[in-house]
């Protein structure tokens, strides 16, 4: 039995409500869990959608499903300390029916203020990378593992990485986003995003530049744009661009000679 995506979303939403309103966590048999785990795999295969009308309906349906998750995130207080310190939650932005989805770690100060992921200096670099790939920000979907800015001690500046517990607590929202959007390719930006998504701790040297999978979706791992801002070496920038060329190939996008020779 394969559950359809809307049905799976309803089940997850119902379990979330039970967990939030009851002292007892919902229980499920091993068989039920195995079936739930199998569902996103089935759902991640995009149905062939031939007409523009079908595609528009699919996009609207996904936008509605995402809006429902966004509303739950907006009022989420699962991490009480972050719910107190945030200006607002930062859900995600972009095309609900995107072929390509980027995953970062957590909102920084700029994102916390503006309510949109990747709007600071690192975000501007990501936008430039997308442009070089012939994408606009609106074409892809961008989200973080954590939807709230990790809190900082009073009077201190900068950002801290999210803790494993914070990532584990917030991860179900990202899983829902991925299950709704069903991108053809995922890109994880940095080792923290990889840890949040896959639970794998490894160095970027071990992780980047080759294909991984998340629930049968091809996953490319590359450096976070903030790393490129700290390390301006052309060799590091070229590595990221080569990862993006692999992404374009996987998406079967045309690649010009200019793009092949491009350096970020
Ligand atoms: S980080 Fe995620 S789980 Fe924690 S309060 Fe924010 S939205 Fe909720």
Image (cartoon, rainbow, N blue to C red):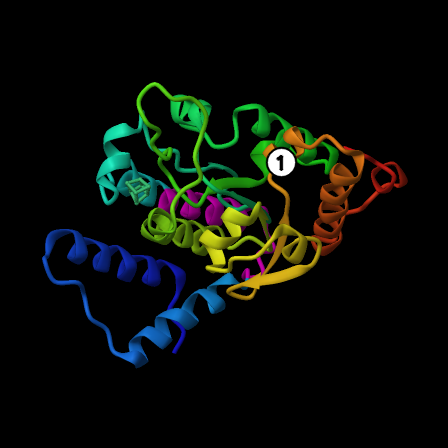
Split into quadrants, the picture shows ligand 1 in the one at top left
Looking at the image, which residue sits at the far bottom? 31
- Residue nearer the viewer, 133 or 122: 122
Q: Residue, x 38% and y 46% (percent of image)?
A: 163
> Badge 1: how crowded within 10 Å, few (<14), some, or many (20+)?
some
- Residue 242 at x, y percent in the picture: 77, 46
- Residue nearer the viewer, 74 or 53: 74
Q: Residue, x 55% and y 60% (percent of image)?
A: 46
Q: Is residue 90 magenta?
A: no
Quadrant occupied by the C terminus: top right
Above or below, comparing residue 208 to residue 3 in the picture: above
Write the start and end of the magenta stretch as one range. Answer: 46-66
Element at badge 1? helix
- Left or right side of 223 for 65: left
Q: Residue, x 76% and y 33% (percent of image)?
A: 233
Q: Within the image, what quadrant is residue 136 found in?
A: top right
- Residue 70 at x, y percent in the picture: 34, 40
Looking at the image, which residue sits at the far top? 155
Q: Which residue is mark 1?
A: 227
- Residue 101 at x, y percent in the picture: 56, 46
- Left or right side of 70 for 220: right
- Residue nearer the viewer, 78 or 17: 78
Q: Residue, x 37% and y 39% (percent of image)?
A: 147
């Amino acid at each position: 039995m394969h559950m359809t995506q809307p049905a799976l979303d309803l089940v997850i939403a119902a379990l979330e409500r039970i967990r939030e309103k009851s002292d007892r966590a919902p229980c499920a048999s091993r068989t039920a869990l195995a079936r739930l785990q199998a569902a996103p795999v089935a759902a991640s295969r995009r149905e062939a959608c031939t007409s523009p009308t079908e595609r528009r309906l699919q996009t609207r349906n996904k936008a509605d499903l995402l809006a429902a998750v966004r509303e739950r995130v907006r009022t989420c207080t699962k991490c009480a300390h972050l719910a107190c310190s945030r200006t607002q939650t930062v859900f995600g932005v972009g095309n609900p029916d995107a072929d390509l989805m980027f995953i970062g770690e957590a909102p920084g100060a700029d994102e916390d203020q503006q309510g949109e992921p990747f709007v600071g200096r690192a975000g501007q670099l990501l936008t430039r990378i997308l442009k070089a790939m012939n994408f606009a920000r609106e074409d892809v979907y961008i989200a973080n593992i954590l939807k709230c800015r990790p809190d900082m001690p009073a009077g201190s500046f900068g950002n801290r990485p999210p803790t494993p517990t914070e990532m584990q607590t917030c991860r179900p929202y990202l899983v829902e986003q991925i299950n709704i959007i069903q991108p053809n390719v995922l890109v994880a930006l940095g080792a923290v995003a990889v840890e949040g998504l896959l639970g794998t701790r490894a160095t970027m040297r071990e992780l980047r530049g080759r294909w991984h999978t998340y629930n049968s979706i091809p996953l490319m791992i590359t450096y976070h744009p903030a790393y490129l801002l700290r390390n301006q070496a052309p060799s590091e920038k070229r590595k990221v661009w080569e990862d993006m060329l692999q992404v374009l190939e996987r998406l079967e996008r045309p690649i010009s000679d200019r793009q092949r020779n491009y350096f970020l």
